[in-house]
Image (cartoon, helix red, strand yellow):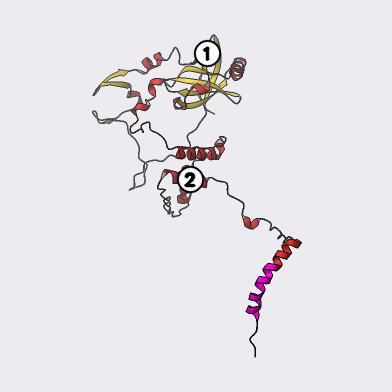
């Protein structure tokens, strides 16, 4: 793994030297823009619209547009000076329960490993957090970006999730067309709960795959091999007219499939129970009343 940051975790007066590694990787299949006429990849050019010249990296600085077309400029050293005090320290401010943090706050995950002679302090912090069940809320600055972070134990490793500041989370009240509070049909609610119960299972991340990426990679392989590919359009699903029917259809779809009756072992036929004397007598009366009909039906015509 490539080290993306080096510093220390600070809690109280304790410093734990650590290295940071990205815990995730982007596996999206990247595409480039190509000129259809000649097949050449297009390049992005940094060009000044006023001077009409290409601009080199050493001629570029950063600026903030405080009014339309007006900027204040910053040198690289000015921005770096803002992070000198906390640029190499993950400062734990509080310890909280993980369940207190809504998932909307989480951004990106990193692994932290002990650096230099920090193995003992690293192990101490990890064991203390594991035993108390707490996670640390910290401040950290990575690549000139200040973030809150959650420090927690993941298997036998300390991990860090950068999290948004509260003012970076948009309020739900800004979401348009949210339904107003209203009564819910009890039968529909019961069926919805039943469907949730049938779909409930322990989380197994290994069973979830990126189907789009797999199909795209397969298509790339066929095109590289020179094969012509035609993808049939997916058949539209049947339109369920009402919510109750949709819930019922969903429940039926997730029901366990019964065993094939054709594969079951045929059961021997049961013999009819022997009649008792009373049943035989009653049966004789019934047979007697029916006998003339059978005799008439089987009588041969006289010659």
Q: Is residue 212 above or below residue 20?
A: below
In the picture as drawn, the residue positioned furthest to the top comes out as 13
Q: Main secondary structure of the magenta part?
A: helix
Quadrant where the N terminus sits is: top right
Which mark sits nearer the N-terminus, 2 or 1? 1
Q: Residue 248 — which label?
A: 2
Q: Which residue is nearer to you in this view: 153 or 100?
A: 100
Q: Position of residue 268 (x, y in %)?
A: 71, 59
In the rendered image, residue 39, in percent from the top left (x then y), is placed at 36, 46
Q: Residues within 10 Å of mark 2 (few under 14, many from 20)?
A: some
Quarter occupied by the C terminus: bottom right
Q: Could you tell me which secondary element the residue under label 1 belongs to?
A: strand
Highlighted magenta segment, given as a residue range:
285-301
**Can you give x and y, in whole percent of width and height, for residue 175 in the image?**
35, 30
Whole-angstrom CA distance, mark 2 to mark 1, is 55 Å
User: Would you say residue 287 sits in the magenta stretch?
Assistant: yes
Residue at 45%, 50% in the rendered image: 223
State which quadrant residue 284 falls in. Answer: bottom right
Q: Give the residue at the far bottom of this rendering.
A: 303
Q: Above or below — where is 253 with respect to 172?
A: below
Q: Which residue is mark 1?
A: 10
Whether residue 297 is in magenta: the answer is yes
122 and 266: which is toward the camera: 266
């Amino acid at each position: 793994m490539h080290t993306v940051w080096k510093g220390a975790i600070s809690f109280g007066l304790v410093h734990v030297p650590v290295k940071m590694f990205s815990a995730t990787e982007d596996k999206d299949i990247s595409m480039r823009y190509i000129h259809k006429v000649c097949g050449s990849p297009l390049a992005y050019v940094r060009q000044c619209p006023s001077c009409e010249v290409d601009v080199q990296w050493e001629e570029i600085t950063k600026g903030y547009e405080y009014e339309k077309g007006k900027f204040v400029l910053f040198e690289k050293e000015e921005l770096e000076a803002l992070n000198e005090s906390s640029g190499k320290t993950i400062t734990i401010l509080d310890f909280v329960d993980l369940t207190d943090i809504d998932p909307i706050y989480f951004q990106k995950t990193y692994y932290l490993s002990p650096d230099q002679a920090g193995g003992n302090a690293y192990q101490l912090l990890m064991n203390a957090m594991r035993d108390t069940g707490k996670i640390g809320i910290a401040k950290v600055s990575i690549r000139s970006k200040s973030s809150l972070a959650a420090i927690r134990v993941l298997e036998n490793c300390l991990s860090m999730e950068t999290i948004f500041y509260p003012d970076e989370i948009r309020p739900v009240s800004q979401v348009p067309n949210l339904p107003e509070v209203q009564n819910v049909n009890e039968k529909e609610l019961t069926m919805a709960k039943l469907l949730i119960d049938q779909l409930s299972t322990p989380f197994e991340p290994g069973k979830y795959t990126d189907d789009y990426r797999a199909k795209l990679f397969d298509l790339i392989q066929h095109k590289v091999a020179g094969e012509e590919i035609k993808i049939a359009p997916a058949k539209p699903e049947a339109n369920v007219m009402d919510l109750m029917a949709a819930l019922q259809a969903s429940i039926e779809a997730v029901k366990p499939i019964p065993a094939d009756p054709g594969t079951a072992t045929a059961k021997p036929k049961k013999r009819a129970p022997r009649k008792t004397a009373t049943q035989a007598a009653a049966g004789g009366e019934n047979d007697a009343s029916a006998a003339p009909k059978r005799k008439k039906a089987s009588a041969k015509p006289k010659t």
